[in-house]
Amino acid sequence: MVTSRLPPAALTLKQFLRRQQVLGLYRKILQTARQIPNEADRRYVKQWAREEFKHNKDATDEAVIRMMLTQGTMQLQELERSLQLAKS
């Protein structure tokens, strides 16, 4: 009997797109962190991002992933606003 199962390592299109979205958010956070003038604060934000993404890397529940992406995006926006305020 032939089955149409995907190999374990293969991603569905939806999973691939979600993965790209998560990686994009991670990269954007790290890029934004580079703009932080204080080195200790910059290291803290980068380490925080690494730990959060590493801690949640095995999440599979779509609703939980969406919620985490929303929270991460809001935190990124807050960081960007803080940097803008610091520059003005």
Image (cartoon, helix red, strand yellow):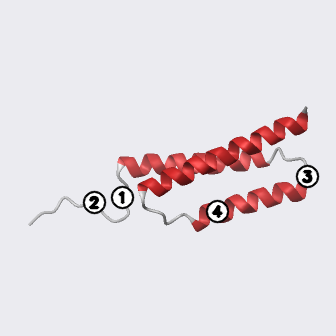
Q: Position of residue 33 (x, y in %)?
A: 77, 49
The kind of residue tagged 3 is: Asn
Q: CA distance from mark 4 to mark 2?
A: 29 Å
Q: Residues within 10 Å of mark 2 (few under 14, many from 20)?
A: few
Q: Nearer the viewer, residue 52 or 6?
A: 52
Mark 4 lies on residue: 52
The kind of residue tagged 1 is: Ala
The kind of residue tagged 4 is: Glu
Q: CA distance from mark 1 to mark 4?
A: 25 Å
Mark 1 lies on residue: 10
Which of the image's four quarters has the C terminus? top right
Q: Nearer the viewer, mark 1 or mark 4?
A: 4
Q: CA distance from mark 3 to mark 1?
A: 42 Å
Which sits earlier in the primary sequence, circle 1 or circle 4? 1
Q: CA distance from mark 1 to mark 2?
A: 6 Å
Q: Residues within 10 Å of mark 1 (few under 14, many from 20)?
A: few
Marks 1/2 in contact by CB < 8 Å: the verdict is yes
The residue under the point 77% across, 38% down is 81
